[in-house]
Image: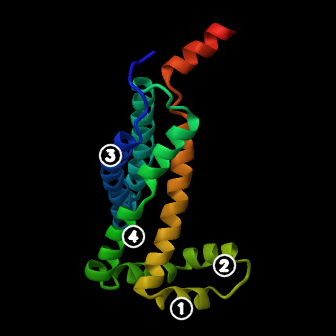
Amino acid sequence: MSENKFDIHEARNLAAHWALWLALWWTLSFGSTIVSLHYPFLGLFQWLFAIWSLMWLTRKLKGYANEVDECGFMRRLWLSWTTSMALLTTMLQYIYFRFIDQGRTMSAINELMSREDMREALKGLLGGEDWEAQLELMSNITQSQLTATMLIMNLTAAFVAAVVATIFSCPDRMKTEQHRKE
């Protein structure tokens, strides 16, 4: 067992540091999503960055749990959630849509939705609803509505990432103790 005790102040500082790195991975994933609207083959990178961020967070949590005593599931979940809350990523997305994008993303989506194969797919997804009305609704979204939507999506993704990373970050000493009991 390690000699280090869990320190909430140290854990907060560590979560803030990790959050910067996680925001970088998630921002690269978001950027890949935007670029993939124009170059679809680059869409693969959005998933690579997302999966990498999850593996990176899991590895960091596991390393911390191996170094610190009393770092059980709930503390690892708290650390993971504090790291993942996605507020920095949402701020960067807002800056992109507010100052950089200037409607290019919506234009690319409109162009994509004007293709016949996408129309048929959208009709199937909407269950017979008018896809043109849905597209019109999407094109009238304000920056604040888009930011609120991105925040909700980011917090949902952050929660899922936090839970998954916590589940797979079981420290090595816990596994060893479980094997001894068996």
Which of the two labelled residues, at mark 4 and mark 3, occupies the earlier sequence position?
A: 3
- For the residues marked 3 and 2, what is the alpha-carbon distance in whole angstroms? 48 Å
Q: Which mark is residue 37?
A: 4
Q: Which mark is residue 123?
A: 2
Which of the two labelled residues, at mark 3 and mark 2, occupies the earlier sequence position?
A: 3
How many neighbours does mark 1 have within 10 angstroms: few (below 14), some (14-19), or many (20 or more)? few
* Residue under pointer 3: 13
**Label pair 3/1, CB-CB below 8 angstroms:** no
- For the residues marked 4 and 3, what is the alpha-carbon distance in whole angstroms? 37 Å
Which of the two labelled residues, at mark 2 and mark 4, occupies the earlier sequence position?
A: 4
Q: Quadrant of the N terminus?
A: top left
In the image, residue 164 sits, relative to residue 6, either above or below, namely below
Q: Examine the rendering and report whether any part of residue 38 can be seen.
A: no
Q: Nearer the viewer, residue 3 or 100?
A: 3
Percent coordinates x, y for residue 77 in the rendering: 53, 43
Percent coordinates x, y for residue 94 in the rendering: 35, 75
Q: Amino acid at mark 4?
A: Leu
Percent coordinates x, y for residue 69 in the rendering: 46, 25
Q: Amino acid at mark 1?
A: Glu
Q: Nearer the viewer, residue 38 or 159?
A: 159
